[in-house]
């Protein structure tokens, strides 16, 4: 019996090891290849090592200004992160109470999560175009010539693209918060309220510190999902692309390791965010455990 | 009041406090109303509209749908739409079967063979971290491996298994399926692992005590009890692949058709009514698949 199990264990462990290799191997190859020498190509062998392709990247790829796309993505990511955290925490608090229509809202959120992204993207893009048409008609009808001439579109990074990305990040945020409150022990909150704390005080000083690690996790979902988001923003982006959209366009045209350098750069950013999050969560969990063991 | 709250369900503390529930849920609800519900309604409406080269013309015409299914009554030669659906469904099935088998095996290993919770957490995190990095980067990271002069071809030629570089490795159906499995197995692992962690370990003991072989335990106890996770994972993978245009575009070298790609191309040419009609059909197909997959799994209980 025991031997039987240990054979199974080794077979499964080997399978798992291969799976990890499959997951990480390709990324590691482009990480290595992004340090190609100036003569190097898209595949091995390495022809020297250098930061050449990172310098090239900073100069921009063709007409694409990587620097400004980078900054745009970063800003949008931060906005998406803040809204994802604020809106999902707030809504998850609502779901702990009697919320009329809560079931409907929940199923809408789940539907948004599993809805093919191209449909959402088309829908958001279409809505904003119709809005543009309606506004133009309105300006003409009202005789606002200045507006009629200067108005171009309502589509943009912080309107349509932001909304399209939120339909993707909010479901993750809300589901994480649901999982948190399903396991939440409200005894401390009860105690605070019994001792006369206001609802805000009990949230700010009792509930929030307890859920803080998960809130950081929600923030991470918000940022990393936005940072790499393509499908939902693709048809709803307006004139200026985010970094991943530029990157997607470059895959067909760029034939030098500069694209690997870009890959390494964005992956490093993702890793930093994930690393910080895991660090914060581990730290606060350890602190919480330290506190409870002292009691 | 306090006498009842102390014995009531744990939600009671929240229930008696703070701003009105609908007020707290309103911002989130508003986002989904404006950027999800309204767009879906407009897609449905516009799918019946007419269009000239410059503008959309409100109407109620079935001509977009007729255009999509033009020539589809011919049984001997499939029309473009049916061909595209056939190829998309094929990708869907292949991606589903591979992610399911691999995801289930990985989750099974993590849930039942890794003994300490610490190790479980670390290995689970290792599986999830790539999910938080760029999909496109993960796709192009196959180029140095699968390309004409890539590592795989070098190895095959080195081993004298083939005499010249294999072209079917990259920018092909093979690389598309490979990328799907690479990117989306995580959507199987997480829900299946979650389901498995809820299985009462005493049941496995009981099965073994009753004389079941490990395989029988796996097939008759673990698989049925992981059903919810399997269904949720399947819904994720299938809906993503059905609407995909990014992976098929990049890994297929922009040469392979898919339903999502048709919609994307039509949108970029501003053929909104046609794109909308295609989106409605895609949505109907996806809903039918989901409906077939699940007869109401209560997702809320699984969190």
Image (tube, rainbow, N blue to C red):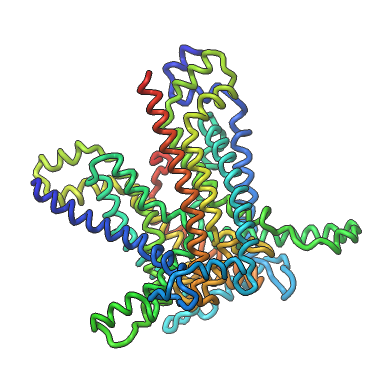
Front residue (pair A101, B66) = A101
Note whether B114 is above or below A74 in the view shown: above
Query: Total of numbered circles in the picture?
Result: 0
Front residue (pair A225, B23) = A225
Which residue occupies 52% across, 70% down? A52
Note whether B103 is above or below A44 in the view shown: above
Residue B60 on image: x %, y % = 67, 66
Which residue occupies 43% across, 23% down? B9
Horizontal side, residue A221 vs residue B220: left or right: right
Horizontal side, residue B236 vs residue B60: left or right: left
Front residue (pair A172, B272) = A172
Q: Give residue B204's quadrant in the image.
A: top left
Residue A131 on image: x %, y % = 73, 58
Q: Residue furthest bottom?
A: B163
Residue B297 on image: x %, y % = 39, 46
Q: Is residue A109 visible?
A: no
Quadrant location, the C terminus of chain A: top left
Note whether B137 is above or below A280 in the view shown: below
Which residue occupies 34% across, 84% down? B165
Note whether A50 is above or below A276 in the view shown: below
Residue A145 on image: x %, y % = 90, 61
Q: Is residue B211 visible?
A: yes
């Amino acid at each position: 019996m025991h031997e039987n199990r240990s054979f199974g264990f080794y077979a499964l462990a080997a399978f798992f090891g291969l799976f990890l290799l499959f997951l990480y191997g390709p990324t590691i190859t482009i990480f290595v290849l992004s340090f190609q020498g100036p003569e190097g190509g898209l595949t091995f062998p390495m022809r020297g090592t250098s930061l050449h392709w990172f310098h090239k990247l900073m100069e921009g790829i063709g007409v694409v200004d990587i620097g400004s796309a980078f900054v745009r993505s970063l800003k949008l990511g931060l906005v998406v992160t803040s809204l994802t955290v604020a809106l999902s925490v707030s809504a998850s608090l609502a779901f702990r109470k009697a919320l009329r229509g809560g079931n409907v809202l929940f199923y809408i959120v789940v539907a948004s999560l599993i809805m093919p992204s191209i449909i959402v993207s088309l829908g958001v893009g279409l809505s904003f175009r119709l809005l543009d048409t309606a506004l133009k008609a309105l300006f003409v009808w009202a005789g606002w010539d200045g507006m009629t001439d200067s108005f171009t579109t309502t589509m943009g990074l912080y309107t349509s693209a932001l909304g399209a990305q939120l339909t993707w990040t909010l479901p993750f945020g809300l589901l994480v918060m649901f999982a948190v409150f399903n396991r939440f022990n409200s005894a401390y909150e009860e105690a605070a309220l019994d001792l006369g704390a206001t609802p805000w005080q009990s949230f700010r000083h009792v509930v929030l510190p307890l859920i803080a690690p998960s809130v950081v996790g929600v923030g991470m979902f918000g940022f990393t999902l936005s940072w790499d988001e393509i499908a939902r923003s693709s048809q709803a982006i307006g004139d200026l692309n985010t970094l991943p959209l530029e990157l997607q366009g470059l895959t067909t045209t760029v034939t030098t390791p500069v694209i690997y350098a870009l890959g390494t750069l964005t992956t490093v950013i993702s890793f930093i965010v994930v690393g910080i999050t895991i660090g914060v969560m581990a730290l606060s969990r350890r602190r919480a455990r330290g506190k409870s063991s002292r009691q | 009041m306090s006498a009842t709250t102390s014995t009531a369900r744990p939600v009671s503390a929240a229930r008696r406090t703070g701003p009105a529930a609908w007020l707290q849920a309103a911002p989130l609800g508003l986002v989904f109303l404006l950027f999800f519900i309204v767009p879906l309604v407009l897609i449905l409406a516009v799918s019946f509209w007419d269009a000239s080269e410059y503008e959309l013309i409100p109407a109620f015409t079935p001509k977009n749908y007729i255009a999509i299914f033009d020539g589809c009554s011919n049984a001997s030669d499939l029309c473009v739409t049916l061909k595209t659906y056939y190829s998309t469904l094929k990708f869907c099935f292949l991606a589903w079967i591979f992610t399911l088998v691999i995801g289930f095996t990985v989750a099974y290993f993590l849930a039942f063979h890794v003994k300490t919770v610490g190790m479980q957490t670390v290995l689970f995190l290792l599986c999830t971290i790539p999910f938080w990095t760029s999909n496109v980067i993960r796709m192009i990271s196959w180029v140095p491996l699968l390309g004409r002069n890539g590592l795989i071809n070098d190895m095959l030629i080195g081993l004298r298994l083939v005499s010249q570089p294999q072209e079917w490795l990259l920018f092909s159906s093979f690389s598309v399926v490979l990328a799907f499995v690479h990117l989306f197995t995580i959507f199987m692992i997480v829900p299946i692992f979650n389901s498995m962690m809820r299985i009462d370990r005493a049941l496995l003991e009981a099965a073994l005590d009753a004389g079941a072989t490990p395989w029988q335990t796996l097939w008759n106890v673990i698989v049925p009890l992981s059903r919810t996770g399997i269904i949720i994972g399947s819904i994720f993978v299938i809906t993503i692949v059905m609407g995909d245009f990014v992976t098929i575009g990049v890994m297929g070298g922009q040469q392979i058709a898919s339903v999502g790609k048709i919609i994307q191309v039509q949108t970029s040419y501003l053929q909104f009514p046609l794109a909308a009609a295609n989106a409605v059909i895609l949505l109907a197909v996806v809903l039918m698949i989901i409906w077939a997959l699940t007869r109401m799994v209560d997702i809320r209980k699984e969190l």
